[in-house]
Image: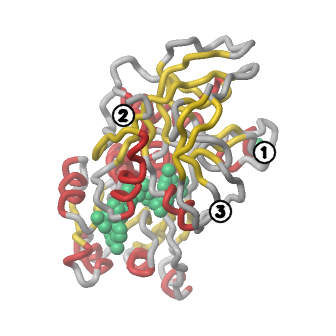
Amino acid sequence: MKMQAVRYHGPKRPFVLEQVPLPGPGPGEVRVRIEAAGICRTELHFESGLLNLGVAPITMGHEIAGTIDAVGTGVEGRREGDRVIVYYYAGCGECTWCERGEENLCDALRAEYGFINDGGYAEAIVVPERNAVPLPPDLPFEQAAPIGCGVTTAIHAANLARVSPGEVAVIYGVGSVGFGLIQVARLRGARVIAIGRSPAKLAKARELGAEEVVDAAATGDVAAAVRDLTGGRGADVVFELVATRETMLPASRMLAKRGRLVFIGYSEDRFEVHPIDLVIREAVVTASVGNTLAELHEAVKMVSDGQVKTVVDRTLPLERWSEGLDAVRRNQAVGRVVLLPRR
Ligand SMILES: NC(=O)c1ccc[n+]([C@@H]2O[C@H](COP(=O)([O-])OP(=O)(O)OC[C@H]3O[C@@H](n4cnc5c(N)ncnc54)[C@H](OP(=O)(O)O)[C@@H]3O)[C@@H](O)[C@H]2O)c1
Ligand SMILES: [Zn+2]
Ligand SMILES: [Zn+2]
């Protein structure tokens, strides 16, 4: 049996839609019929060669939701017909990171779906039982898929940055992860300032809870704008979701004393800062990658409870993946473009 999949063939090579064998579950594994798979900007970093993990060919896609249609021997907690979302890391279970539940930093990953193993731009995927996290019955798959990276990345970064009540949190770059962060930071009691360039995304940022928005396209000095909005104090936390030359310097200059700059996004550009800008404010530069399994469970609950909304720009059948990738490349999507492999 064969299935369709959108495959990565190495850095600077275009993805290809091709036929691959339909995988079957081994012991302790389940097969998920994929109903929806979100396109993350990270896919563009694979395509450009910026992110090169050295494994090709693989199927792209790490925001994966669907229905279990086959279970391997020894599977006890999942059944055929269960609606699930995939946790994209499978840690070794033995290193110090895994022992602490921080599989995203595992020293010897067994799998990372859509990064070094086949991911979700396909009709099906096989994962260990524990990586198939249950979804509630009333959550549409296309709304659920962006939880897998968009919402979980936001929760992980907010946890690492210890966003606290009364703090000012700047969300620099209001794409899919940014929309998640606006809501998560608000729930932590922060005052949120969102920075973007598209009026439609800034309007959505306000709708999701940003108290102030800064239109970077119409503002000469973005750091000064944030200082003005905070009575000169600056931001306690800045989440960097763009990380280009244009954004990194203002991001570091808008920090308050003891402010934390958290890199989530990255580009071809390097981060250059004069240490004195950090020293005089005891500022902290840090970063966030992926999420833990517990954070995915928390993310599913937050979306199910209506505390956090995912934002879907459009859905497309799998065959039209390149149109979706193009919309992300051109910054035309307000929220996620979600592929529907069953349509
Ligand atoms: N560390 C992790 O675990 C992790 C997880 C997921 C994603 N990522 C990375 O995080 C970044 C964001 O991901 P995403 O999927 O949310 O991307 P996205 O949806 O494309 O969002 C980024 C947004 O930044 C805005 N932007 C671009 N240049 C800007 C500028 N100069 N000033 C202000 N805004 C600007 C763009 O919209 P407008 O220009 O139209 O405003 C775009 O919507 C990517 O680099 C991705 O690879 C990292
Ligand atoms: Zn992602
Ligand atoms: Zn490990």
Mark 1 and ligand 3: say if the CB distance to the nearest ligand atom is below 8 Å. Answer: yes
Tag 2: residue type?
Glu
* Of 306 and 177, the residue lying toward us: 177
Badge 3 element? loop
194 with respect to 317 (left or right)? left
**What distance separates the C-alpha of mark 1 from that of mark 2?**
35 Å
Badge 1 element? helix
In this rendering, the answer to whether 18 lies above or below 23 is: below
81 with respect to 313 (left or right)? right
Q: What residue sits right under mark 3 in the picture?
A: 52
**What distance separates the C-alpha of mark 1 from that of mark 3?**
25 Å
Tag 1: residue type?
Thr
- Which quadrant would residue 221 be assigned to in this image? bottom left
x%, y% of residue 240?
A: 44, 65
x%, y% of residue 51?
A: 60, 63
Q: Are there few (<14), some (14-19), or many (20+) residues within 10 Å of tag 2?
A: many
x%, y% of residue 78?
A: 59, 15
Q: Quadrant of the C terminus?
A: top left
x%, y% of residue 136?
A: 41, 20
249 with respect to 297 (left or right)? left
In this rendering, the answer to whether 175 lies above or below 133 is: below
- Which quadrant would residue 132 be assigned to in this image? top right
Q: Residue at x 32, y 78 (%)?
A: 223
Tag 3: residue type?
Asn
Q: Residue at x 53, y 84 (%)?
A: 272
Label of residue 96 in the image: 1
Q: What residue sits right under mark 2 in the picture?
A: 142
Badge 2 element? helix
